[in-house]
Amino acid sequence: MKLLIVNPNSTTSMTEKIAACARRCAASGTEITAVNPADSPKSIEGYYDEAMSLRGLLEAVGKGEKDGYDGFVIACFDDTGLAACREIATGPVLGICEAGMHAASMLATGFSVVTTLPRSIPIIEDLAMLYGMQRKCRRVRAADVPVLALEETDGEARQKVLAEIRRAVRDDGSEAILLGCAGMADLTAWLSQEAGMPVIDGVVCAVKMLEALVGAGLRTSKIGAYAWPRRK
Amino acid sequence: MKLLIVNPNSTTSMTEKIAACARRCAASGTEITAVNPADSPKSIEGYYDEAMSLRGLLEAVGKGEKDGYDGFVIACFDDTGLAACREIATGPVLGICEAGMHAASMLATGFSVVTTLPRSIPIIEDLAMLYGMQRKCRRVRAADVPVLALEETDGEARQKVLAEIRRAVRDDGSEAILLGCAGMADLTAWLSQEAGMPVIDGVVCAVKMLEALVGAGLRTSKIGAYAWPRRK
Amino acid sequence: MKLLIVNPNSTTSMTEKIAACARRCAASGTEITAVNPADSPKSIEGYYDEAMSLRGLLEAVGKGEKDGYDGFVIACFDDTGLAACREIATGPVLGICEAGMHAASMLATGFSVVTTLPRSIPIIEDLAMLYGMQRKCRRVRAADVPVLALEETDGEARQKVLAEIRRAVRDDGSEAILLGCAGMADLTAWLSQEAGMPVIDGVVCAVKMLEALVGAGLRTSKIGAYAWPRRK
Amino acid sequence: MKLLIVNPNSTTSMTEKIAACARRCAASGTEITAVNPADSPKSIEGYYDEAMSLRGLLEAVGKGEKDGYDGFVIACFDDTGLAACREIATGPVLGICEAGMHAASMLATGFSVVTTLPRSIPIIEDLAMLYGMQRKCRRVRAADVPVLALEETDGEARQKVLAEIRRAVRDDGSEAILLGCAGMADLTAWLSQEAGMPVIDGVVCAVKMLEALVGAGLRTSKIGAYAWPRRK
Amino acid sequence: MKLLIVNPNSTTSMTEKIAACARRCAASGTEITAVNPADSPKSIEGYYDEAMSLRGLLEAVGKGEKDGYDGFVIACFDDTGLAACREIATGPVLGICEAGMHAASMLATGFSVVTTLPRSIPIIEDLAMLYGMQRKCRRVRAADVPVLALEETDGEARQKVLAEIRRAVRDDGSEAILLGCAGMADLTAWLSQEAGMPVIDGVVCAVKMLEALVGAGLRTSKIGAYAWPRRK
Amino acid sequence: MKLLIVNPNSTTSMTEKIAACARRCAASGTEITAVNPADSPKSIEGYYDEAMSLRGLLEAVGKGEKDGYDGFVIACFDDTGLAACREIATGPVLGICEAGMHAASMLATGFSVVTTLPRSIPIIEDLAMLYGMQRKCRRVRAADVPVLALEETDGEARQKVLAEIRRAVRDDGSEAILLGCAGMADLTAWLSQEAGMPVIDGVVCAVKMLEALVGAGLRTSKIGAYAWPRRK
């Protein structure tokens, strides 16, 4: 099975981190490719960045479709362009927020999301509503670290994320944590250990759920809103 | 007051129709400019078309912001890129679906949307939910006419729209109709007449509500999710 | 265009304040009349006061309809008798809570209401739900000042309102504030200045949106629940 | 236990029918009084009629409170003035729509309401939402008979109600029917018989639930929105 | 009227307390029997305990049905097996959470539940949603006392419950309290007194509402999901 | 990876069909065991059957936990006892309705469920709500075939299921179908072929998603409602 992961931003170090994380969790028969657009914002921090990343993202998925990939992951927690990508893909397409929320909802009666910046909170709250997760997702929190600070190695960012997880347990009554940024993927093991509870990464969930859907022989429905784009 | 209307698709005849419609309803002190991107899809019929229109749309709004426009209308019923545009505008930005739904909800206890193609139904249903209109909007219906067929003059498209309006009254218990495509703007008067009830066009609503918000001295909030895009 | 504003309580100083505020924001061609019933409660502070103001309110709207007014504003934040007034009006009828919530929802991803007394909180929460604003309206707060204290000039009331606004920004994540009482209309500019964010007054919103709907040629639907009252 | 039933309309034959129905179901120790305002509309068919009945209704409840009644029923399916009455009553106050919906929800997984006129449908749908019954109440239907036609004895009205019940079973998947007008109280037994399923009358439910609440020693909460009206 | 109360756990001292409480509030013509299964968990503290109590509960209700009981109360705040019991009963079957929530919603605009252990919070939140009470029930709180600690007489448990009630009033804006455990039934009077507001016990509510429904001649609907179990 | 599938009913032919279906879709390293309780109802057709199957189901999961299974599937579309099983399992536990709904929601904007008997519709509608799928799940339909009729080979049952799928496409606007009974697992390929759209089986989805969660190293959260049952 060949899976294509597209990181919609243009920070290749993040793409590599995502790829490494995906390959670690992938099944033996799964071949992972991870790419990012060249002309996209360096990080996706708001609606405008999302919009500016779409052409590159769609080109990457379109090329992946021609190259015969069996399924696609959009590796940005805003699930940028998810529905548009589904129109041009035969196989399933998953967002990491979507996959992470579905996974979390099957492991705990309630979870909190911990993302990077406060401005992303309303975006993720809207996704939670669109996915039907507004009850299970008890609160979306921000650790107040910019996305690219996660690429630095001094550890201040991870301490802020951990502190926010502790607030989520105490104040939200949450039983699991979903990390709200693809750039946090490498922190999962350490955070789970520290917090003593399931800390869930969307990249891993998306890769594994994509393997599941492809392995089940399922494909994106083409009889409605995800049908191929109309010729003009 | 200077208002900029951006039609996100590249069909200039539609842009002209929209501009004419907007000017007819604008207040005497309002100056209307209507533009469309050059490299956008001919029509917006689904998520992919939306995504492909965003760069051009954002460039047009960004230019308008520099040129001192007081407010902006996105003249596509999918409210393409609405939140992203708000990040780069000082004044208010309205989508025609959004403005139309708010207007309809203040004139009737329930309304139906009549749009062009069935594939747009889930898109508009999601907008209704995001705007809090899922109860007031009793049903989203499609007349099953492609967007560009509305540019033709043989009248078949308008008959299909009228037939769908009649079904909405009979089956949905709706008390008003919201036309679900900017390209239907010129049919409003005729349809209202035929149907004997408020038939509402989003372009007119957006222009008038934008005048209202600008006239009230209100601007897009810049302290949260609609703050200016972050420098990288 | 002739607009009638009805303040449902019988405090004429408040009616005058509302009228002044409405005239300041009205378009040049708009003629504003503001009235209040003589036999109504001095202030509307709860369901009972609302109920006791209805006959006078309806008489005022009924007379306005005969006198050819193009539209009506109910200038009480409980939107007292809104649906009943729509049954006896040809033009649009807007409540100031309704208009303010619709406006706020187009300028921010979330807003808080700051009203006078805690007992009004459930009333406004129910309105938010009826208008579909229960998500956008992140919280209804009370500054704990009686309505008529807003008519006093020592400034204590306004300080309490400002303090509550600051709590709303800090604790609710709100990006805009909607003032929850017609008697706060004259505080808007000062509060916006102090808070550094959109502080929205329902009276202004209702007047401007009413101008918008009337200007768009729209009227209350008469084919359903807002049809003229049945003869017995 | 002394219970006061107020029919908010001024049709005394309906008040008598309601009283008879209430007395038939009341417990042995329950004393039923039923009254109606003199200056109210003949029937409540819409928001305007509701509003015009409120002063008389509140006077009746206020007098009942002074006379020591233990609890109150508002015998109109729009639950006219329910919250306002609670402000001026020590004991519980129930609406017949409210009591009927609560009862139906404990006997069936879903029910339909059959009311008189289509214009009442949005009113009852809003009540269902306020009471949290929007899922259990699968549909509000109208038999299209004016309220006062139920006072006639030719049987045409009851046949229309039965036909609508049959549609509710077939099309809504409902397992019980709630009659949506106090004037239908005397049809309950016949309709249950014909339809072979629980057909529920709100008057009976309200009387019995009021006996239950009073018997449990429960009273209207006076620490929030139902506190006594403020002195001005 | 003969009513059967089944306490699904096997702690007979709790069954006796429940029976005493039920008999104190029952009408003169009502005969109360209270039983519990022998082989059930000592207390119901979570989903597993619920599941393990079901066979005994169903046997008790099944026997009660044969013995001609007119209605049934399930005296556990998780409303264990409520729907299953309805399939095998002719008369109405009420849960104490369900009855308590319906009662509270008719006495206050919002209430909080105070239960025993934090692990029961998601269970009761789900019940609130299923009963349509997710808005009226402003929060479910736990006093963090095990169920059987309520059987001890040193008073520590009741002080914890009272402290949690005080937090509910201050932080949730609740106007009434619903006690979230059948074992709290004997604390109701003392807590109401201390808190100065309606403190509601589900056992009393269920008994009185069951008297109401049986007295109204109403029975469980047998034409849908509560029909008798299918023969295999 | 060792997965245990528990069919809560006692029809071993159905258990074998489920096992065969699970093994066909399982990854190469996955070992599938399928069991059913001996003393359970022959089929689960309603709440009572569910309740009567729980002890056997929990024993099977408890034994599986001791035997070191990595995860569990409950192979009944009512997701019988799902939360209770999570309390006694270290690894993830999935219901087939739950897994199927999550899968369907990632492949289509809306889907319909086609189950066996009408009495199961409210059960599945409640599950949809609990899982947050009430919007995506556009309708729950019943083909009106008893569960055990699916074990017969004359083909009448499958024709009824196909007819209901066709109605779902035409009337619900659904883009995918979820089969609402474990006993339909072997019909999936034929129905997909006939209907020309994704027809999804919950057993396959649950097995593949369980592989995904286990493969991602995720386990049931043990810090809240799914903690181990309390010792008494």
Image: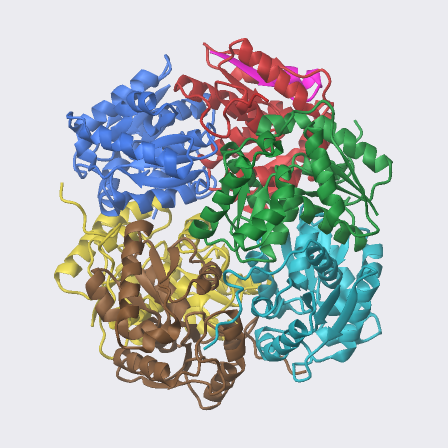
Chain colours: A blue, B yellow, C brown, D cyan, E green, F red
Q: Residue at x 48, y 31 (%)?
A: F103
From the top left corner, tell me how far across and down residue F96 is, in percent: 56, 27
Q: Residue at x 59, y 47 (%)?
A: E190
| Residue at the farthest front position | E154
Does residue F11 show up magenta in the picture? Answer: yes
Residue D105 lies, in percent from the top left, at 67, 50
Q: Which residues are magenta?
A: F1-19
Please state which of residues A161 and C43 is positioned toward the viewer in this rendering.
C43
- On the rendered image, what quadrant is the C terminus of chain D found in? bottom left
Residue F137 among those drawn in magenta? no
- Does residue F133 appear in the picture of this structure? no
| Position of residue D125 measured from the top left corner of the image (x, y, whole percent) | 59, 60
* Quadrant (top left/top right/bottom left/bottom right) for the N terminus of chain D: bottom right
Q: Is residue C214 left or right of residue B231?
A: right
Image height of B81 relative to F133, above or below = below
Pick whichever, C96 or B171, lies toward us.
C96
Task: Locate residue B148, reporting x and y percent.
Answer: 36, 57
| Residue C129 versus residue A84 in the image, above or below | below
Quadrant for residue D166, please give it: bottom right
In the image, taking residue C208 as reference, residue B175 lies left or right, namely right
Task: Specify whether B28 is left or right of C5.
Answer: left
Q: Quick check: A194 above or below F174?
A: above
Residue furthest toward the bottom? C67
A40 relative to B42 in the view: left or right: left
Q: How many marks?
A: 0
> From this viewpoint, is residue D164 visible?
yes
